[in-house]
Amino acid sequence: MSSDRAILALNAGSSSLKFALFEIGASLDLTAKGEIENLDASPHFVAYDARGAKLAETHGATSEFAATLGHLLKFVDEHLGAARLYAVGHRVVHGGVAHVAPERVTPALLSALDALVALDPLHLPHNIAPIRALASARPELAQVACFDTAFHHTMPREASHFALPRALTEAGVRRYGFHGLSYEFIVERLKSSAPALAEGRVVVAHLGSGASLCAIRNGVSVATTMSFSPLDGLMMATRCGALDAAVVLYLARAGNTLAEIEDLLYRRSGLLGVSGISGDMRVLIASKDPRAREALDLFNYRAAIEIASLAGALGGLDGLVFTAGIGERAPSIRAEICARLGWLGLRLDLSANVGNAKRIGAPDSQIDVRVIATDEEQMIARHTLAVTNEAATA
């Protein structure tokens, strides 16, 4: 490494931990990235360099989280050589109402996050775990929490509130929105590559195993499809997306427990539930089974009508940006979604789309259509550097 300091970005899930290591120089340069899978069973650690060449791979014998994290820190120290780990940034899925910007981790912030677990019991405990483990293993190391909900705090009341009694709204039952770090990265890319579009009305489609849309005007979130939780909105790999609340009542009256309903809606629905085959878009696209086609049609239909809905929230549409795994690498899905939006004056350049070009709108399209690769870890690293630098100069 050419720099003497580095930032580690962590993105923790229920059974995996993604990481990216950036050296601090004139810019933040990726030097290693990877993932630890099967955290709750037999951890599988793999790391790559910036070009994708494998640096290390191990299969762990224990699922004890502190030991797994220690293995990651050992790799980081060895990879850095004479350089040192300067700070660690974390993706924290939920920041509630109060946490609308990245924050230095303190005991007070950890207590506040513990209090928010009731709003997101499926994700927040997994985000908090590596923060606490690092505080114990490396208490001198600066840590920064980067909230996925923060980007959406600009939404107006009509876009962020449910039609529920005020007491529930004041208790935190409202629309928050997620994938904020991804949307923030896309906005920054648009500002540098298409400044005029960045000042306009844009819908960004973050389509991956978790999927959502965001309506952005002049770089600011005004509406989004995920709401109180990452379960709402678009159909996803295993999540149902938008659902009549009475279905949950029906399932409860039919004798299903809360845990069973939660498992059904989060892990057995979406592409997997409809197809009965897989939640992996690649498998379904390749399949000849009519159930796979039905799942794809429903996914594309839901995405198209929600894009149209967000165009209404924006008062028109200047641009559509596809990002995340499906959005970046599934041209057939992009084509089918856009075909349903032809009434808006949207036209694709079919050859550009098949080639995964950066601009895929046809010359006569009234809407600029783009594909931009997102990088949440880069965003986490930027925020971490900014917060720690600010603290150092305060």
Image (cartoon, rainbow, N blue to C red):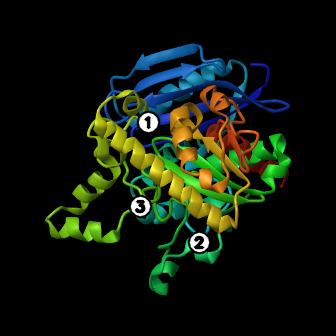
Seen at 24% across and 62% down, the residue is: 258
Residue named by callout 2: 159
Residues under labels 2 and 3: Cα distance? Answer: 15 Å
Q: Position of residue 100 (x, y in %)?
A: 66, 63
Alpha-carbon neighbours of circle 2 within 10 Å: few (<14), some, or many (≥20)?
some
Horizontal arrangement in the rendering, residue 320 relative to residue 12 (left or right): right
Residue named by callout 1: 16
Pick whichever, 370 or 69, lies toward us.
370
Residue named by callout 3: 242
Q: Position of residue 194 (x, y in %)?
A: 82, 44
**Amino acid type for the residue under numbered disc 2:** Ala
Q: Quadrant of residue 256?
A: bottom left
Alpha-carbon neighbours of circle 1 within 10 Å: few (<14), some, or many (≥20)?
some
The mark that comes first in sequence, 1 or 3, is 1
Q: Is residue 76 visible?
A: yes
Horizontal arrangement in the rendering, residue 255 relative to residue 184 (left or right): left
